[in-house]
Image: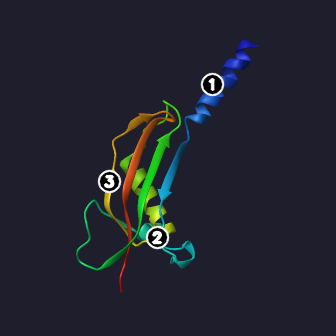
Amino acid sequence: MIRNMLLIGSATLILASCTTWDTSNVKRSRPAAATASVSPETVIVTSGDITDRPYKKISDLKVTVNKTTALHPSPTPEMVVDKLRTEAASIGANAVINAKVSDVTISAFSWGTRIGTGEAVTFSE
């Protein structure tokens, strides 16, 4: 009985340690139906401004990437940048400017959290 409980507990812990979860908070300034299809791989993410071409701001972005258990590796800055790209592409943005990625912190809901913020923009023709 105790052996079975230990096996089940160990299996649960191992499976739970293989997951991460994330959230995002996107404030859209225009309807979702008006967005163009953009591939996340083509979205530019920069910590500064883009000055070589005109753009229009679509939305402020805020994403969170978490680890589920203490045994899982902490979220990396690359994971946060990928999430920023995905969210920006989902609203038709070509770039994320003024991007910032936090250090790893422990929160009430996660053993490790990184937050990313930025401004989703689309380039003017």
User: Mark 1 sits on what residue?
Assistant: 10
3D distance between C-alphas at marks 1 and 2: 47 Å
Q: Amino acid at mark 3?
A: Lys
User: Mark 2 sits on what residue?
Assistant: 29
Element type where label 1 sits in the image: helix
Label 3 crowd (10 A; few <14 / some 14-19 / many >=20): many
Foreground label between 1 and 2: 2
User: Mark 3 sits on what residue?
Assistant: 100
The one of 93 and 19 positioned closer to us in this rendering: 93
Element type where label 2 sits in the image: loop
In the figure, residue 11 lies in which quadrant? top right
Q: Position of residue 106 (x, y in %)?
A: 42, 33
Q: Residue at x 44, y 67 (%)?
A: 41
In the figure, residue 82 lies in which quadrant? bottom left
Q: Residue furthest top?
A: 2
Q: Is residue 109 above or below residue 81?
A: above
Label 1 crowd (10 A; few <14 / some 14-19 / many >=20): few
Q: Is residue 14 above or below residue 120?
A: above
Q: Amino acid at mark 2?
A: Ser
Q: In terms of sequence position, does the residue under pointer 1 or pointer 3 come before the other?
A: 1
3D distance between C-alphas at marks 3 and 2: 21 Å
